[in-house]
Amino acid sequence: MTSFRSSSSSSSAPAAAPADLEPADMTLDELRPVLIREMLPDIVFDGWTWAAASAAAERLQIPPERTRLVFPNAERSMVEAWIMLADSDMAAQLQAENVSAMKIRERIRRAIEIRLEQAYPYKEAVRAAAQILSRPQNAAASARRLWRTADVIWRCAGDDATDYNHYTKRLTFSAVYSSTLLYWLQDDSEGFADSRAFLDRRIENVMQFEKTKASVLKVRHRLPSPVRFLGRLRYPGV
């Protein structure tokens, strides 16, 4: 049985720089995920602060003023960069595990498991990040990042919908992921068994919703159109 424990990842970060490129020679986009990885051990003690960023930058021999450019919105920029990096790491691990042979619900479940496994060594950093994104001024950024994570998970699960299903799937799954993450932050059960059970229940809810939605769509074309009905009231001869 899979548990939410530490999992290593060899994936490349967003805007990955060539392996032989020194941090001082990277663009800001290339440097951002590198600096985030270097910061993670410090965040456990210092939080998402300039102190953590500066300590990491010093080890990478990055000037302090350049660090400010990497994270223009301070702690919010740091958290957003970590979420993007986590999306990339999760997708790479899913690809490495070749989840295409799994059923859709199993792929989705595995995606969230991987996400939490990779975050486990930095659970306090996750908690601090959640607190930052919960602030009213960060609501829009939080919603964008959550939507993007849901989109990455669905794409990794093989979803290629382009109609309104694209949006409903991501909307419902955003709720599944965010609620599971919050539950996981409070879970102290053995091997996070309670979090796994919670996740299974939420995914079952989504699957039932998708089945109901599919049934409604099958009969929708048989139902009278309100628009056509109102049109006949206005133009009886049509």
Image (cartoon, helix red, strand yellow):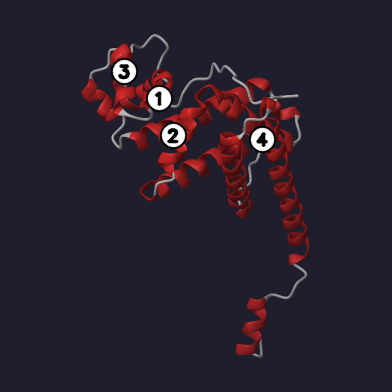
Q: CA distance from mark 3 to mark 4?
A: 34 Å
Q: Label 4 belongs to which residue?
A: 195
Q: Amino acid at mark 4?
A: Ser
Q: Which quadrant is home to the C terminus?
A: bottom right
Q: Label 3 belongs to which residue?
A: 55
Q: CA distance from mark 2 to mark 1?
A: 9 Å
Q: Are marks 2 and 1 in contact (CB under 8 Å)?
A: yes
Q: Which quadrant is home to the N terminus?
A: top right
Give the class, few, some or many, for how many residues have Cα within 10 Å of label 2's Cα (few <14, many ≥20): some
For marks 3 and 4 on the same chain, the one whose residue lies earlier in the sequence:
3
For marks 2 and 4 on the same chain, the one whose residue lies earlier in the sequence:
2
Q: Residue at 51% of width from left, 40% of height from top?
A: 148
Q: Amino acid at mark 2?
A: Ala
In the figure, is residue 50 to the left or right of 5? left
For marks 1 and 3 on the same chain, the one whose residue lies earlier in the sequence:
1
- Residue sitting at the far bottom: 236
Give the class, few, some or many, for how many residues have Cα within 10 Å of label 4's Cα (few <14, many ≥20): many
Give the class, few, some or many, for how many residues have Cα within 10 Å of label 3's Cα (few <14, many ≥20): some
Q: Label 1 belongs to which residue?
A: 43
Q: Residue at 29% of width from left, 21% of height from top?
A: 54
Q: CA distance from mark 2 to mark 4?
A: 19 Å
Disc 2, SS? helix
In the figure, is residue 100 to the left or right of 162? right
Q: CA distance from mark 1 to mark 3?
A: 10 Å
Q: Label 2 belongs to which residue?
A: 128
